[in-house]
Each structure stands twice: as C-alpha cells, then as structure tokens.
Image (cartoon, helix red, strand yellow):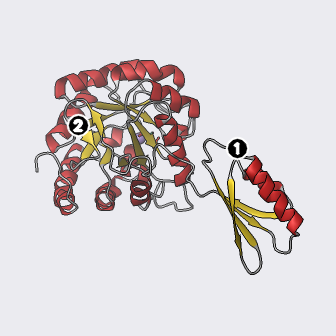
Amino acid sequence: MIIVLKPNITSRQETAVLKEIRKLGYRPHVIRGVERVVIGAIGDERTHHTLETLTTWPQVENVMPVQKRYKLVSREAHPSDSTVRVGLRVAIGGRQLHIMAGPCSVESEKQLLTTAHAVQRAGATLLRGGAFKPRTSPYEFQGLGEKGLKLLAKARAETGLPVITELLSETQAELVAEYADILQIGTRNAQNFQLLIAAAKTGRPVLLKRGLSMRIEEWLLAGEYILANENPNLLFCERGIRTFETYTRNTLDLAAVPIVKRESHCPVVVDPSQGAGRSDLVTALCKGAVAMGADALLIEVHPNPAEAWSDGAQQVTLAGFARLMEELRPLAAAVGKELPGS
Ligand code: PEP
Ligand code: MN
C-alpha cells in the first residue's frame, strides 16, 4: 500500500501513522518529498490487516493499493494462457478459434436439431441455446426449462457438439450441470455471487458474461469467485455494456478483449449477438473480436429469425452463419488462429 500524507503535518502526526502501520504488521518505508511525505507499507495485504482504515485519519490524504484486488484470475498468478477443456475435442484458449453457435432460445426439437446440424456443417464447435431465459418482461417467453435441456442433450448426442446453456438460479445449478457442458452466467446475474459459487461448485466450466454496467475490474473480481471456489475453468465473455447509444442494443466493448487477455490468463469469448442486437452487424463484430484476440465467439443462429421466440432481430440465418464463417477464415488465419475445416 502507498500512503500519502497531507502537506504541513507535524512530525508527531507522521510518527503516529508509522506506528499504526507497524502495528498492523507492515514495514513502513518513508519517501520525503518537497511538500509531502509518502509511505510505502511493505507486507502481504492478503495476510495482514487492511490499511484502508488510514483514509479516515486527518493527516492522511490517500491510501492506494499496489497489488491488484483479483489474484487467481490474474496473469501474475498464472503467466501463461489457460485453456478450458470441454469434452475430448474442445480446448478453448489455444490456437483454435472456437465458435459456439445456436439459437437464443431452444423452441422445439425441429428448430434446435436443424440449427445444430447446420452450424456444425459450417464449422461451429459448440452448440448454444437457452432453456431458462432471463427476460426483461415477465410476459415474454421464459424458456422451455428442463424440456429444453433434454433437447440440447439430444442435439449433442446427434452432432457430438458440446452444449452451453444458461442457469438463472442456485437451485438450478445441479440440474443444468447434468445436461450442459458449459454453464453460462448471464449479464443480469454477473454479480450474483451465490449463483457464481453454486456454478463453480458443479465442476463444469463456467462462461461469465460481463454485467450490463460492469467495470472490467468488477468483472475480473466476479470471475475470481469461480477460481476461488476450486474451479479453474472460467471463460470471460464480453457481450456489450449499456451506454447512451441507441443504434445498437448494447455497446460491444472490444477494447475489453485485449485488456482482459493482458490482465488475466483465462480465455475470452465475445458475443456479438447480444453486443449489437442487430444481425446485420454480427459479421463485422466477429471480425473485430477475432482481430482483438478473442479465443471464441458466441453467436445466435436461428432457422427463421423473423419467427424467433426471443432476440429475433439479432439472430443470423443458417445461410448467413455459413457465410460469416467463410468470411472469418482468412481473418482467423491472419491472427494465427485456426477455424475447423481450414
Ligand atoms: C443470451 O445469451 O441469450 C443472453 C440472454 O445473454 P446476456 O445474458 O448476455 O443478455
Ligand atoms: Mn439472446
């Protein structure tokens, strides 16, 4: 910790601060400037008492941490990239760019299976689909629940694609983990810490969406809950944040990709579908995400978006998805990533 003292304090006031720092288990190192004194307090902030209480002292101007608040997700804890293994064939965070594709909501067997086969043919390596949907209005389609999970399992059995799906509450953790290969924590639940703990404890990999108005530090700290609960398999997913802009549903923060990749060893996924809320922007945003270093993309695909039960405006068609994949190929190669079938 760095403790900055106010100018013109007495030596008695300075001594009192030094005494307190020692009392709390730190070694003070005094830097005497022209106008003020700065103290570096040396000691492990994880094992010692916090020095933040010094901010309430009248002679103290500021107390600043040197260490990051997140530990296990940080690059300091794990300098090389982590890979998250899903089943036998998928390792997210390596050379291969992974594509998680499928409908926003699971609606019917026909809708899901048609989509699953089509996205697989086009090169997707995982199947997405919501069975429990976090809808803004209680009058909108809430998802098929367990029936939806069973359909996802059927689609996996037919295609071999591992499945990612969202859970909304702690009480669903065991049930969803029975069917899903990756648990998705949605933007609205990104700081539901009890849910994060319950998801971590299932042992399944967890994809943590960024909260609608979450700062990157808060997002990293939310991710810390997964690793701190003995689950090393965490994926961060940028899906847009709320801003004043209205041309897009959210503002996809692509700068977050290299920032999180620099700060953390965990793989980063980008969801351009929730990010823009517009199917016409999905390809461009996918390209941007890949150029920024994303390890995987989460893309909503529907056989007939105009009739989708949720998020119709942002879902791409089966043909649109196949085109998108072809457009991504040269870009992925340019940044040293591979797409299946390349
Ligand atoms: C979704 O993936 O369909 C979804 C609801 O995502 P988010 O939580 O990012 O809105
Ligand atoms: Mn959606």
Q: Nearer the viewer, mark 1 or mark 2?
A: 1
Ligand 1: image quarter = top left
Query: 213 or 276, which lies in front?
Result: 213
Q: Residue at x 43, y 62 (%)?
A: 255
Using the rendered view, name the quadrant where residue 146 is placed.
Answer: top left
331 vs 191: above or below: below
Residue pointed to by mark 1: 49
327 vs 212: above or below: below
| Kind of residue sitting beneath label 2 | Val
Q: Which mark is residue 90?
A: 2
| Kind of residue sitting beneath label 1 | His
Residue 270 x, y percent position in the rendering: 37, 50
Label 2 sits on a secondary structure element that is: strand
Q: Residue at x 16, y 54 (%)?
A: 326
Label 1 sits on a secondary structure element that is: loop
Query: 57 or 220, which lies in front?
Result: 57
- Residue 89 visible? The answer is yes
> Is 144 on the left or on the right of 25, as rendered?
left
Q: Which mark is residue 30?
A: none
* The residue carrying mark 2 has its beta carbon less than 8 Å from ligand 1: no
Residue 259 x, y percent position in the rendering: 43, 59
Query: 318 or 159, which lies in front?
Result: 159
Q: Work out whether mark 1 precedes mark 2 in sequence or the reverse, and give the earlier one.
A: 1
> Is 201 on the left or on the right of 325, as rendered?
right
Residue 241 x, y percent position in the rendering: 51, 53
> Crowding near pointer 1: few (<14 within 10 Å), some, many (20+)?
some
Residue 331 x, y percent position in the rendering: 21, 61
> Is 108 on the left or on the right of 14, as rendered?
left
203 vs 28: above or below: above
Question: How far apart in space, not on screen, are marks 1 and 2 (Cα)?
Answer: 43 Å
Q: Residue at x 26, y 36 (%)?
A: 126
